[in-house]
Image (cartoon, rainbow, N blue to C red):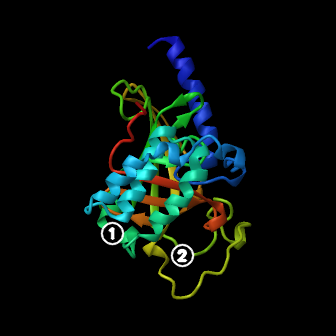
Amino acid sequence: MTALRLDLFKTLVSLFLIFATICHGFSSSPSFRPVRSSSRLQLFDLKSIFSSSDTDKTTASSSVTEVDSLKGQVEELIIVTQGKAAAIHLLDPIFEQIESQNTVEAPNRDPNFKGRWHVWFTDCPPPSNGQLGPFQGSAEQDIVAQGNEYNNILRLPSNSRDDQWLTVVLDGIWEDWDGKELSDGDDSDSSTGGSFSTPLEGTDWGAKYWKVTFLRLNFSLFGNLLLSKDFPAGVARVWRSTYLDDDTKIVRASRTGRPDDESVFYMKRSVRPNKN
């Protein structure tokens, strides 16, 4: 291994540790979220992206449901924009329409919720979107079928390529959320300085909400584990599951559990294709 590769790896590790403490693990940081200005809306025109012929095809096919059509719109736009966070202005209204079609009342308890999922889009800052410094890779999530462990995985280059040289894996655990607000991503209580809201009695929070706790980061270079670093105790996030079917799920994640603190993650079983 050359000295140049080692220097590059050390630089990437430093960048990742900074970003990971801010946002990794399907979290959100309001101060880093993209500004949703009207000027960014001018970058994309839904009518120009989705031609009338595509609409006609959707209408003509009786097997295509409303949610299938909405997912098709979302996924085409994600591919066209390559998952850039600026597209949230166009995507979020469609996400909300998809979420309104959700038929799984307790998605977090559905066996299909677990397993391997690929992040197609998120408006969360790097590295949750698969970006590390100047490098663009891919992000995915693996929730084990048994137990309460999960991994968030960053690959450079993206998962669609065979020449990956850097893999970063976040090890974490999940539990049913109890409805108590986290103190900006810190799982503390009033005795240690945190501030909790009072949860509503009788609410089945675990059906749609998980509290996830970060444990450690593992860095591998060319398939060889080089470094593991533990997170400080109590670094946690809240995941709110808003849509689930056989091949798609939408999760809104936050540092506190409040809706105004959320970022959205649109995930698929399949790898997001590159723009042609």
Q: Is residue 61 above or below residue 53?
A: below
Identity of the residue furthest to the bottom in this view: 202
First reached walking from the N terminus: tag 1 or tag 2: 1
Amino acid carrying label 2: it is Asp
- Element class at badge 2: loop
Please state which of residues 228 and 80 is positioned toward the viewer in this rendering: 80
Does the rendering let one see residue 115?
A: no
Q: Residue at x 67, y 47 (%)?
A: 34
Task: From the viewer's perspective, tell me whether residue 241 is left or right of residue 63.
Answer: right
Measure how far apart labels 1 and 2 are at the Cα level: 19 Å
| Total number of numbered discs in the rendering | 2
Q: Position of residue 101 (x, y in %)?
A: 42, 70
Amino acid carrying label 1: it is Asp
Q: Is residue 34 above or below residue 233?
A: above
Bin the neighbour count of mark 2 within 10 Å (Cα to Cα): few under 14, some 14-19, many 20 and up.
some
- Element class at badge 1: loop
Please state which of residues 66 and 244 is positioned toward the viewer in this rendering: 66
Q: Residue at x 44, y 14 (%)?
A: 1
Task: From the viewer's perspective, tell me whether residue 46 is left or right of residue 153.
Answer: right
Please state which of the two labelled residues, at mark 1 or mark 2, is closer to the viewer: 1
Residue at image mark 1: 110
**Rendering quarter of residue 200:** bottom right
Residue at image mark 2: 178
